[in-house]
Image (spheres, coloured by chain):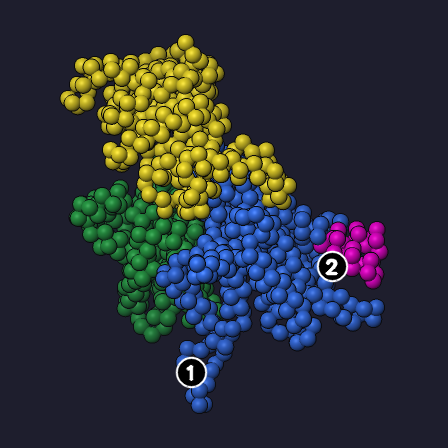
Chain colours: A green, B yellow, C blue
Amino acid sequence: MEFAVSQILSGISLGGQYALIAIGYTMVYGILRLINFAHGDVFMIAGVLMVYMSASMPLYISIPAMIIFTVLLGFLIERAAYKPLRSAPRMSVMISAIGVSYLLQNLALYITGGQPKTYPRIPWISKTITIFGARTHVVTVVTPFLVIALVLILTLLIDKTKIGIAMRAVSKDFETSQLMGVKINTVISVTFIIGSFLAAVGSVLYFTNYPTVVPMSGAMPGLKAFVAAVFGGIGSIPGAVIGAFIIGICETLIKGTDYAIFSDAFTFALLIIILVVKPTGIFGEKTTDKV
Amino acid sequence: MSNNVLHLENVTMQFGGVVAVDNFSMDINEGEIVSLIGPNGAGKTTAFNCVTGVYEPTNGLVEFYGKPIVRNHPQGKMKKGYLGQNGDMYLGEVISQTPDEITKLGIARTFQNIRLWKSMTVFENVLLAKHMNAKQNVFSATFRTNKKEEERMRRETLELLKQQGLDKYKDELATSLPYGLQRRLEIARALAAEPKLLLLDEPAAGMNPQETEELTAFIRQIRDDYNITIFLIEHHMNLVMDISDRIYVIEFGKEIAHGLPKEIQKNPKVIDAYLGG
Amino acid sequence: MLNEKKGISRGAIITLMIVLVVCILTIVLENTINPNSLLFTVIRKAAVYSLVAVTMNLLNGFTGLFSLGQAGFMLLGAYTYAILTIPTDVRDSIYYLFGGAGFHFSTVSFFEGIIGDSGVAGFISMILGVLIAMLVGGIVAAIVAYLIGLPVLRLKSDYLAIATLGFAEILRAIFQWDKLGKVTNGANALRGYPTFADFNIKNAQGITVLRLSSFIPILFAGICILIIILLINSSYGRAFKAIRDDEVAAEAMGINLAKHKMMSFIISSFFAGVGGALFAMFASTVQAKTFTSAMTYEIFLIVVIGGIGSISGSCIASFLYIACSEWWLRFLDNTQYINGNQLPLFKNGFRMVVFSVVIMIIVLFFRTGMMGDKELSDLFNKKRRKKVKADE
């Protein structure tokens, strides 16, 4: 019983962390139709930044500073690597994304010297508590609530603000919105800023549970978050969040069995099943091709 | 009466709640040039796509030389939501084929917005239409044991290009040709598939009057040279009236008239649809 | 193009001669200069990567299928090759963690049993065993590709990419599963099978008389690439290109999309499997954790640098890529001094950073890669055409 509770709790928490990354994927895909392969690595860089900044600054400065730098990184990646390819074929942009991912990983390898770096302890979330007899960290309990709060704010932002309306317009029809005077570049930048911000928050929660950061730390969570986004219906924020929770919980449950080695594979099996059965995901909208 | 080539019977195509083609029937006989006209958005291209296998009609039957090639009745979600007529006429066997299968039966087409293979030369564009009927497999083609077949395809392609006056451009990229010639090339490519029925989707779109006139002669020429039947969709009234043996007119997916060009020109419903719409 | 005119074009002949010169140079150099030079590591790895890059180009560049499963098919080929060729007598020692091997057949030992296991007979047995195992490796990859292709080839561009990437990850997990340890050796490495070094010809005293360990990978990869080139220039290759250019038009002209896409996918995977076997021979150990998505990305970047849709581009890019990452940029990883002052930045890992920046520059500013969709032979043919014009 205690084991089950702790498994489910950490599954929900992991799902929440994936959700924060998945939103970045789903929003970028919704607007640019681009799988931003570098997003997982932005998340990893956020972890590396935190390691180095917390070494010289107190947490109440280093956390906000880390978030700001991560957001800046996301913004710069878009401006440097994706914006010049706006009119290029979609494949070129995806290649660029793979290139950025490769660059960020090698950069992290260079900075860390290939050594796993210990993630700083953040006192008020890495405390141990007991719930229903299961011992766990505060972060496990805090994550789902934080995720839900952030998603609510984000939904409000998209529904009510001017930039939110612009985002929805662009994701519906890129060209027409441009003709209607929507400032495409601003909308895209804001999308990347929001995505990177959430990835930075996610990294704090994620790495508190996994004590070390390595250059490849972002690759797997990134891919899984993307799967979550596809699972929920790419372009849909609630879809991405629900997909992420399902994947997080399933993964944790599998990790507790003899088939632990398949915990990653399971995610991809789920992806292939959903793509074959319902390619638009749970909440996705149908698109039609015109001949 | 000569042989019936294409027979459409109660073809209905419904997208969600929109009936794009509504209970449309028509016949084309061997050697005829038949046109389908109608205002923008009347469902002409959709009707075309139901024949070529791009769409599976919601209901209805299409026969080619007396043999059913497409047959469907409202199924799945459409069972309840079907808005057309004769929903229970074609129960039973469903026949549905992909565009390549339909083409292999002897129906070739061109596209409204020219679709040539842009990285290939004029020669390769036409040559590839021979691919589907070639007696070869991937091994014989890779290891060049299909030499005779490959030579035959190349010879026939060159012949066809000569007949169409395109042979001097044969090594140019297809997309580097002027617009009018690209149209011609697309028709040549369709002819290379050795069809019995040729479907032309707005062949004169974007052409000036002189080019249109040339095209009219050209279409008539290929009908006579290759002994084929032609079914075309068109907007240019001059072309249509000049070339067609018979004309079908649709509006909002429904047939409003059919008959000889003279009859259509005088038909009040048609005049209304074009001028009133 | 190769088969455009009657006979073989001048460009093709020049290209073939260049390849021939490379082969001869490789053999001569390996037998004259230090055989442990990094040059030969680069040549071997580049040959293997050329093949895999070409298989990826066949899918991405020629058929327009954006697939990222190459590492998975390489894994299948590499494992099949290793499992089939490890000699029977060393098997149990390699699988010791699982209490010995669960599978005792070895193609090499099988032929040794028939032909003989020493001298020339032993050499021939080894070659036969290696060839058959490579072929089976390719076939296994092709069969798995067929099974994977059934559901995923219907997917559109980036969904196909992520689904194939996912399949490769699933394969990796399966091969690391300890329940299959008796066959795959779980997460541990397989070793002891014939490698490129075994192709060096030795005399009766066991002294190497002719080194072929760098020529053999070029030969094997070259044959496979040649077959792919023949395919691309055949009627089927044209059909693949038609699908890439315009799927709707291809279908309307009687090309069965499902069949042709599957064909391209299976053929590409077959050769990726053979490439995996070659990779196993190059690396001399096989371990599932090598075949990550990072490996696929690396191969994909090679294809991009060489030019999507250019076979010779992929080959040249493989060589440059491997040479830069393994050899020419090595100095960046070591501390450098000028006039006794230590230069900043130079330390372990700097090489890869510089390298990835260069790749980003290529991706952003030279989008067509080195060759675009041209081949080496086209370049030579063009030159001639220009000359003819000048003569007129």
In magenta, the rendered stretch is C107-130
Q: Position of residue A95 (x, y in %)?
A: 41, 55
**Disc on res. C93:** 2
The local secondary structure at tag 1 comes to: loop
Q: Is residue C76 above or below residue C323?
A: above
| Between C131 and A137, the one nearer to me in the picture | C131
Mark 2 and mark 1: span between their CA atoms?
48 Å
Residue A43 sits in which quadrant? bottom left
Q: Position of residue C356 (x, y in %)?
A: 43, 65
Q: Earlier in the sequence, mark 2 or mark 1?
A: 2
Residue placed farthest to the front in the image?
A: C392
Q: Position of residue B24 (x, y in %)?
A: 33, 17
State the residue at coordinates (43%, 32%).
B190
Q: Is residue A223 above or below residue A279?
A: below
Regarding residue C217, the answer to whether it shows in the image is yes
Regarding residue A9, the answer to whether it shows in the image is no
Which residue position holds label 1?
C343
Question: What main secondary structure does the magenta stretch of the protein show?
Answer: helix
Q: Amino acid at mark 2?
A: Ser
Q: Position of residue C28 (x, y in %)?
A: 67, 71
| Between C340 and B243, the one nearer to me in the picture | B243
In the rendered view of the protein, which quadrant contains the C terminus of chain B?
top left
Q: Amino acid at mark 1?
A: Leu
State the residue at coordinates (18%, 45%).
A180
Give the letter of the chain under mark 2: C
State the residue at coordinates (60%, 47%).
C270
Q: Is residue B85 above or below residue C299?
A: above
Q: Is residue A64 above or below residue A259?
A: below
Judged left or right of residue C276, residue B170 is left
Judged left or right of residue A268, residue A182 is left
For disc 2, the neighbor class at 10 Å (few under 14, some 14 to 19, many from 20) is: few
